[in-house]
Amino acid sequence: MNLIAERAALLRRYRQLRAIMRDLHSELLKSLPKDTFTECGRKLGFQVNGTLVFETEDEASVLADYCLYDGWSGQHSAVTRFLAKQPYPAGTDQTLLLDAMSRARYSLFQVESVAEGVGVNCRDVLRGDGGTIVDEGLGNTAVPGVIVAGRLVVLPELSMTTGAGLVIDADTLEDIQNVLEDGVQGIGQADFNNLTRQEAAVLSSMIIRCALARGTPSPGTTQEPGRRTETRQHRLSTARRPSRNEPCPCGSGKKYKQCCGRAEQPGA
């Protein structure tokens, strides 16, 4: 099989697995306890005056991803709890994916080279290992040197992300390095290859909070080199508040007073 045929076969398999993963994520989100989004939103800094506030749809995806993989309740995350029920026969793609998803790891991945339209060759900044990530989006937009924070799912035939990545610029990387040097509460001087589930959740929340604080874009967005972004808190504090009868900026389709504005009402 020549290189073109190999890439075509790899992309067909990737698209098949990506579609199954989207369906699994949708099913898993339905199984989450009602307070998971609130609690995880608080940990990641999405809560403003008791209300979950997103500046972009990508931020909502980041929260959903964290809830599914790091929103542990007792001994299980949404993924491991669903897998334990054995909802699909052994050997199916769904079972294969769920098993790999239960071992997914969150980290910083630096792009070393790009296979256009297919994916990227990356180095795990925290763990030191590397490999190929099949991802059409990154294959079309990433450039060598860029660092992406995200969750990696490793399958026997390929590795792919869970689809909720954040680009880490130089300022954000410095913030993360400073936090790690000072020691992260709940992690200590951890071996990133042997994190407990609690330590892994603390690590991912720290990276996400640092990225959001800097207003870090999602993969595929470009930013003027060397431009320091405004903090999330500053952007939210200086943004114009909608009037009570205007459409809510969260995109729900409701009026502001009936949606995010409810938290500002007396007795809310």
Image (cartoon, rainbow, N blue to C red):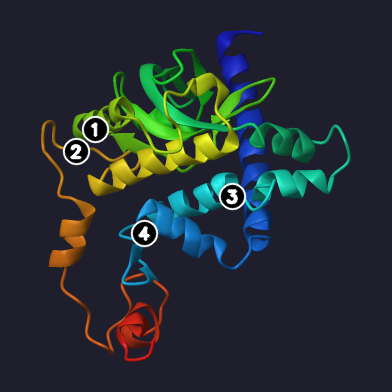
> Sequence order check: which comes first, mark 2 or mark 4?
4
Instruction: Report the residue marked by disc 2.
Output: 223
Name the image quarter holding residue 196: top right
Residue at 22 percent across and 85 percent down: it is 243
- Please state if 34 lies on the left or on the right of 46 as rendered: right
Instruction: Report the residue marked by disc 4.
Output: 46
- Estimate the spatial distance between the alpha carbons at disc 4 and disc 1, rounded to whole Å: 20 Å
Residue 219 lies, in percent from the top left, at 35, 38
Query: Which mark's residue is nearer the viewer, 2 or 4?
Result: 4
Residue 70 lies, in percent from the top left, at 55, 45
Q: Amino acid at mark 3?
A: Leu
Residue 221 sits above or below residue 196 on the image: below
Do residues under tags 1 and 2 come within 8 Å of each other at their CB atoms? Answer: yes
Do residues under tags 2 and 4 come within 8 Å of each other at their CB atoms? Answer: no
SS for tag 4?
loop
Looking at the rendered image, the quarter that the C terminus falls into is: bottom left
- Estimate the spatial distance between the alpha carbons at disc 3 and disc 1, rounded to whole Å: 26 Å
Query: Which mark's residue is nearer the viewer, 4 or 1?
Result: 4
Instruction: Report the residue marked by disc 1.
Output: 169
The single residue placed furthest to the right in the displayed view is: 89
